[in-house]
Amino acid sequence: MSNSKEPRGQLVTRIVAMPADTNANGDVFGGWLVSNMDLAGGIEGRRRAKCRVVTVAIDSMQFLKPIRIGDTVGCHVEILRVGRTSLQFKIEAWALSFYAEKHQQVAEGIFTFVAIDEQGKPQPVDRA
């Protein structure tokens, strides 16, 4: 887990947790958060590779604190590694509580994407 009190990486997405995003216990569903983190990584991957990218691995994932309905969740993406056809990002999710007006890190993960061409085949990230 990051020990910083501020997010690392670029803010790529921001979304509000809604009642439909909860599990049977009334907590925000972890799958919803992973999906939003994956979307943020895909956006940043496409921007960096200048082509389509696909998720090939979630190398690690930690849920640190619960998210409440009404919290604004921001996904911050930091590039860790650029391979020939792949990009690896650390993605941090931070929630801004509507009630407490403070933000806190709620999750982080390492996501790997591969750049692909129009036929879905891997292609170099840094093409000439």
Image (cartoon, helix red, strand yellow):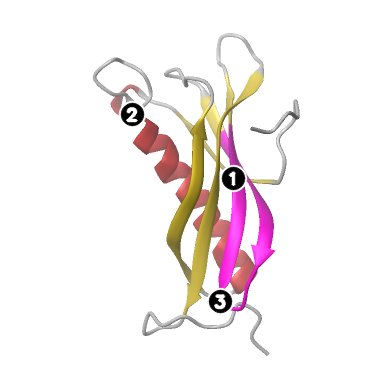
Q: Is residue 18 above or below residue 32?
A: above
Residue 121 drawn at (x, y percent): 41, 83
Q: Magenta-highlighted stretch: main secondary structure?
A: strand
Neighbor class of circle 3 (other Cα within 10 Å; few <14, some 14-19, many 20+) is some
Q: Is residue 89 above or below residue 64?
A: below
Answer with left or right where residue 75 lies relative to residue 67.
Answer: right
Judged from this view, the residue extending furthest toward the top is 99
Q: Position of residue 51 (x, y in %)?
A: 53, 75
Q: Residue at x 61, y 65 (%)?
A: 47
Image quarter hosting the C terminus:
bottom right
- Seen in the picture, residue 58 relative to 16 is either above or below; the reply is below
Residue labelled with disc 1:
91
- Near mark 1 (Cα within 10 A), the count class, few <14, some 14-19 or many ≥20, is many
Which label lies toward us, 1 or 2? 1
Q: Nearer the viewer, mark 3 or mark 2?
A: 3
* Badge 1 or badge 2: first in the primary sequence: 2
Categorize mark 2 by other alpha carbons within 10 Å: few (<14), some (14-19), many (20+). Answer: some
- Give the residue number, with chain letter if any, for mark 2: 21
* Count of picture labels: 3
Whether residue 57 is in magenta: the answer is no
Dividing the picture into quadrants, the one containing residue 54 is bottom left
